Amino acid sequence: MSEEQPVLLRNDGAIAHIRFNRPHVLNALNAEFAYALLSACKSVAADQNNRVVVISGEGRAFMSGGDIGSFSKGMDEDGKFFRELIGVFHEALEILANLPRPVLASLNGAVAGAGLSVAMIVDVAVAADDAKFTLAYSRLGTSPDGSSSWSLPRIVGLRKALEIALLSDVFDAQEALRLGIVNKVVPAATLVEETEKLARRLADGPTFAYGQIKQLMRQSHLNTLNEQLAKESDAFVACSKTKDFAEGVSAFNAKRAPNFSGV
């Protein structure tokens, strides 16, 4: 794969693959990478043919964090360099979080700093059993970005989130599974196969309903119980108007597996 493109985008039928492609620096994030990621996310969002998005890293790591070698430049620009870099990165992550389709991360090697932030903002994460995780920011004398200060307390609870962020200790895939940071741990040799299997399952599912589920879950903390109940009702009614709902009901009554089309 070309190292001239820091992010690769490939469509495999209903599955869109976003692949980090700076393996020589363990897919560390720099400005070029951030802009390429944003471009890929915009392309995925505009393409109504994909029904699931898979994010992975080329080489020995998912993402090792920021490209610290490029940070010295930003120290002389009164925050402009970092504000632009983080702004572009955050815009890409907002697209993934709000995408009305499932986003799946396939995690290997180092999942550190910004890489851990990405792993937590997606909907489902599968990790190789040899993956290593750390938030890392405090080791550089800085605070987190990439939504990790939003995602981490919601996943593990406030006290544990503070421990992970303050100490920046490294933990393994089994601990990430125990904490709920990843959904599944598989042998490293089967990571690609297991990711593909899960992606296919999601791609064959009721895509519109998945979008409603994702929105309900992600926005639930903004609503009172009464407000959330109303939104659940609206979402169910919207789903009831789809071909997939008709197919799901028909398949249930016929005692057969549904064949969803995504609409």
Image: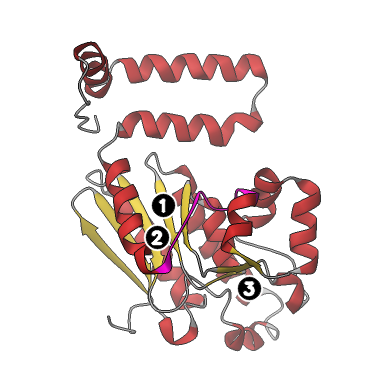
As drawn, 167 above or below 225: below
Dot 1 alpha-carbon crowd within 10 angstroms: few under 14, some 14 to 19, many 20 or more: many
Quick one: label 3 or label 1, which is nearer the N terminus?
3
Does the magenta run of residues contain 262? no
Marking on residue 104: 1
Residue 49, percent from left and from top? 22, 45
Q: Name the residue under label 2.
A: 55
- CA–CA distance in space, label 1 to label 2: 6 Å
- CA–CA distance in space, label 3 to label 1: 27 Å
Q: What residue type is labelled 2?
A: Ile
Quick one: label 2 or label 3, which is nearer the N terminus?
2
Please give the range of residues in magenta.
179-188
Of circles 2 and 3, which is in front? 2
Given contact means CB atoms under 8 Å apart, are the residues at marks 1 and 2 in contact?
A: yes
As drawn, 228 above or below 106: above
Residue 120, percent from left and from top? 56, 54
Local SS, label 1: strand
Q: What residue type is labelled 1?
A: Leu
Q: Which of 212 and 125 is in front in this view?
A: 125
Local SS, label 2: strand
Q: Which amino acid does label 3 sit on?
A: Phe
Local SS, label 3: helix
Residue placed at 61% from the left, 83% from the top?
A: 68
Quick one: label 1 or label 2, which is nearer the N terminus?
2
Residue placed at 78% from the left, 47% from the top?
A: 158
Residue placed at 42% from the left, 29% from the top?
A: 212
Q: Name the residue under label 3.
A: 82
